[in-house]
């Protein structure tokens, strides 16, 4: 091999860069290490990655990766080495970053999802419908943090009559899986609870690990009450999302799904009240008109009937008056009686008995011998 001649600094730096650029095995490789020395200049993020023995300088130009790179985090970064000719520095250019162990957790997630799906835990026909009317919501989440506050704020703003029953649990870390499962089982048999929300804020796959466990999935599937999963942000998916009866993108969205605005209810009630009042008024008015018409018809009929009877009564009175014996006597006639019988002719007179002559104003008794036949 012919030794290289004397090189300028630029020649040397360019040669080194060409070696790194030409080495395909160094392109898009993964390196694991702990982040330290994070700094940002304009739209470029600088940091170092270290292990127990060494460290390398890294640079990232992709802004969507910045949030994943935090001081002290243990990451798996994907990228390629780049030798900076002008400054004579070697840096690792990062295009992707994820927490160490994330790939393994995701593989476990996929395996669990496939297993439970085959067993029918995601079957849409097994989903319970949400209740038409909700009085009490059971919430399974941490007693601290924004999640329970957001659920209460949204629920009570929309419907102040809603009751919120909190079952506090650990939402990540050791013991979280068991606490969440037991909380679901406890609220499942609590008569006063209408629906259950299992909720927590967003986080990495490691943070959400408790919601990807078989223990929690089976508790959710066997729950007797309708269950809503509101775990993480809208882009986060966990096993409990697939098992639950309904998935909400956020805890606040879950509260909105279960409540209706009381203002709208009041308007609906007021509208119904006005409609009922108007209908009742129309009915009363119609009834009043019908009553007045019936009353007038009845009065007219009664008047006609009374007049008819008065006329008939008058005729009867005249007839009776004409038949009154005293009325006849007043016209100069007299009634002749003998032995308690009416005598209507001279031949009927018995000479041996007295005769009674009845006038309209009294009676006169006469002896028979005084009566003469013509």
Image: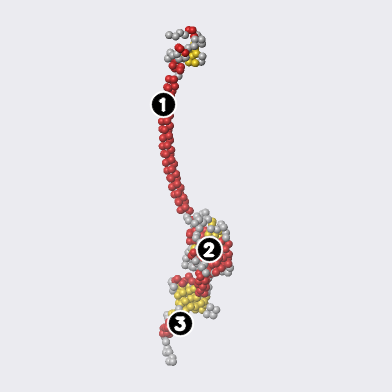
Which residue bears the numbered disc 3?
A: 25
Callout 2: helix, strand or loop? Answer: strand
**Residue 198 numbered mark, or none:** 2
Q: Can residue 161 be seen in this view?
A: yes
The mark lying in front, picked from 3 and 2, is: 2
- Rendered residue at 45%/51% (across/down): 268
Q: Quadrant of the C terminus?
A: top left
In the displayed structure, would residue 100 be above or below residue 185? Answer: below
Label 2 and label 1: CA atoms lie apart by 93 Å
Of the image marks 3 and 1, the number of the one nearer the N terminus: 3
Callout 1: helix, strand or loop? Answer: helix
The mark lying in front, picked from 3 and 1, is: 1
- Rendered residue at 41%/32% (across/down): 300
- Depth check, front residue: 58 or 340: 340
In the displayed structure, would residue 29 be above or below residue 323? Answer: below
Categorize mark 1 by other alpha carbons within 10 Å: few (<14), some (14-19), many (20+).
Answer: few
Q: Where is residue 7 in the image (x, y as percent from the top left)?
A: 42, 87
- Depth check, front residue: 236 or 133: 133
Q: Position of residue 249 (x, y in %)?
A: 48, 64
Label 3 and label 2: CA atoms lie apart by 46 Å
Q: Can residue 205 be seen in this view?
A: no
Of the image marks 2 and 1, the number of the one nearer the N terminus: 2
- Rendered residue at 49%/14% (across/down): 337
Total numbered labels placed on residues in the image: 3
**Extreme-top residue of the structure:** 370
Q: Where is residue 85 in the image (x, y as percent from the top left)?
A: 42, 81
Label 3 and label 1: CA atoms lie apart by 132 Å
- Depth check, front residue: 288 or 160: 288
**Residue 311 numbered mark, or none:** 1
- Rendered residue at 52%/71% (across/down): 115
In the displayed structure, would residue 1 be above or below residue 163? Answer: below
Categorize mark 3 by other alpha carbons within 10 Å: few (<14), some (14-19), many (20+).
Answer: few
């Amino acid at each position: 091999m012919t030794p290289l001649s004397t090189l300028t600094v630029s020649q040397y730096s360019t040669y080194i860069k060409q070696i790194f650029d030409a080495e395909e095995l160094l392109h898009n490789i993964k390196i694991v290490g702990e982040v330290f020395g994070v700094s940002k200049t304009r739209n470029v993020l600088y940091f170092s990655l270290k292990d127990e023995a060494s460290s390398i300088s890294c640079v990232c130009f992709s802004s969507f990766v910045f949030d994943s790179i935090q001081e002290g985090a243990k990451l798996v970064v994907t990228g390629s080495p780049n030798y900076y000719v002008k400054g004579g520095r070697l840096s690792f250019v990062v295009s992707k970053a994820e927490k160490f162990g994330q790939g393994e957790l995701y593989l476990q997630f996929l395996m669990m999802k496939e297993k439970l799906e085959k067993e029918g835990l995601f079957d849409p026909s097994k989903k319970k419908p949400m209740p038409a009317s909700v009085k009490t919501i059971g919430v399974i989440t941490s007693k601290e943090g924004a999640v329970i506050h957001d659920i209460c704020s949204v629920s009570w703003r929309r419907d102040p009559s809603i009751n919120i029953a909190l079952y506090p649990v650990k939402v990540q870390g050791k013991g979280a899986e068991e606490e969440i499962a037991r909380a679901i089982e406890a609220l499942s048999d609590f008569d006063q609870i209408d629906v259950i929300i299992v909720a927590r804020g967003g986080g990495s796959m490691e943070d959400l690990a408790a919601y990807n466990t078989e223990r929690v999935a089976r508790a959710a599937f066997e729950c007797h009450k309708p269950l809503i999963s509101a775990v993480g942000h809208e882009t986060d998916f966990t096993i409990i999302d697939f098992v639950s009866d309904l998935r909400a993108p956020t805890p606040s969205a879950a509260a909105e799904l279960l409540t209706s605005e009381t203002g709208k209810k009041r308007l609906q009630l007021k509208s119904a009240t006005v409609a009922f009042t108007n209908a009742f008024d129309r009915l009363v008015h119609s009834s009043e008109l019908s009553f007045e018409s019936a009353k007038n018809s009845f009065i007219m009929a009664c008047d006609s009937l009374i007049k008819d009877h008065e006329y008939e009564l008058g005729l009867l009175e005249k007839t009776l008056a004409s038949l009154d014996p005293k009325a006849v006597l007043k016209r100069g006639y007299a009634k002749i009686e003998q032995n308690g019988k009416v005598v209507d002719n001279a031949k009927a007179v018995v000479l041996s008995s007295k005769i009674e002559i009845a006038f309209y104003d009294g009676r006169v008794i006469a002896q028979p011998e005084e009566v003469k036949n013509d």
